[in-house]
Amino acid sequence: MNPLRVDLFSDTKTQPTPAMRGAMAGAEVGDERAGEDPTVTALEARCAALLGKPAAVYLPSGTMCNEIALAVHCRPGEAVLCEATAHIVGFEAGGPAALAGVMLEPIAGTRGMFDADQLERHLRADNLQAPLQRLVAVEQTTNLGGGAVWSRAALDAVAETAHAAGLATHMDGARLLNAAVASGVSAADFAYGYDSVWIDFSKGLGAPGGAILAGGAGFVREARRWQLRIGGAMRQSGIIAAACLHALDHHVERLADDHARARRLAAGLAHIPGVAIDPATVESNLVYFELIADGWDAARLAAATLAVGVRLCPMGPKRVRAVTHLDVDDAGIDLALDVIARVLRAA
Ligand SMILES: *Cc1c(COP(=O)(O)O)cnc(C)c1O
């Protein structure tokens, strides 16, 4: 097998840059659990401001942000409304049931999004038989929805509908900064109607780990209790928080490059026989396409391209994902297009 030449599997595959490693090596650190790590404290303050919330807590992963948020907002037996393809539904190992003890009520939306009318139709008056609806959760950008960017108006309408019915709101912002760069709307503006929101540093921002969960002071205090409860409090974690601060300084505006490369990849894929994609749906760094060539499925294509050094992510029987990030350059896009076209032609 050839060495890996371009890795489009996920934006989690980035290597920390030398400058990022330098920032990590020089970080001032302390015991995070005791509130004594100045780099973590600085990151939390900076991100609270970035997200327009009073407080924030640094956690090891985005998954932990989601799981803790559900646990703080809800009691066991209560219900969370979310889009049917949401990360909390299929990719967190059943955490919502195992940790918060909540029911998920999926809404069949479009490209990972739903609107206020759809939400309204899923809301019900409190009755003793049904789970009590407590929280509405959205993803910005949508992952399985293809990196779609919700508009500020759509997010606000969903939040207003939820709040009017007495429900809380949560935003999974794993790629919120991608949405901000793609649209020109600030992260804080997108998060305006949401009681809690988080961003991931291990996706497009290119840091080795960590995520920030933000919300009101009371919410974040209870989130810190859950952080301790499930072992999410670290010690000299300023080492990795320094990478996150470095990413905020150096890796946010450049997300526009990832988006441009994703559009170019989609435009090229649209010309390859056997591939179906609507390039107009590519709004950020996630590119999903369908295989329509006879005899081809996603796993077979991914294996064939990997054998020549191009890694793709099979996401369904015929559905493939390709993700642009810090470690994918223009030549990588050209190579991927060339390899996919050649592999499908050779069959
Ligand atoms: C990656 C991802 C998560 C989980 O984040 P981790 O840092 O990998 O735990 C949650 N939601 C969405 C939409 C994601 O893409």
Image: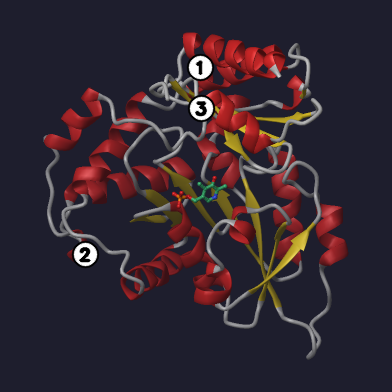
Q: Using the image, determine if residue 326 lies above or below residue 339.
A: below
Which element carries disc 1, helix, strand or loop?
A: helix
Structural distance between the alpha carbons of marks 1 and 3: 24 Å
Identity of the amino acid at label 3? Leu
Residue 174 badge: none
Mark with earlier residue (1, 3): 1
Residue at the outermost bottom position? 128
Q: Nearer the viewer, mark 2 or mark 3?
A: 3
Task: Identify which residue is drawn at 71% across, 71% down.
Answer: 166
Task: Identify which residue is drawn at 66% across, 13% down.
Answer: 341
Residue 257 badge: 1
Mark with earlier residue (1, 2): 2
Nearer-the-camera pick, 329 or 125: 329
The image position of residue 309, as x and y in percent, is: 46, 21
Mark with earlier residue (2, 3): 2
Q: Using the image, determine if residue 7 lies above or below residue 37.
A: above
Residue 328 seen from this side: yes
Q: Looking at the rendering, in which quadrant would you find the C terminus? A: top right
Nearer-the-camera pick, 208 or 32: 208
For label 3, count other residues whose C-alpha is less than 10 Å away and answer few (under 14), some (14-19) or many (20+). Answer: many
Q: Using the image, determine if residue 234 lies above or below residue 25.
A: below
Q: What's the coloring here?
A: secondary structure
For label 2, count other residues whose C-alpha is less than 10 Å away and answer few (under 14), some (14-19) or many (20+). Answer: some
Identity of the amino acid at label 1? Asp
Residue 306 badge: 3
Structural distance between the alpha carbons of marks 2 and 3: 42 Å
Residue 184 seen from this side: no
Identity of the amino acid at label 2? Arg
Which element carries disc 2, helix, strand or loop?
A: helix
Q: Which residue is mark 2?
A: 33
Mark 3: C-beta under 8 Å from nearest atom of ligand 1: no
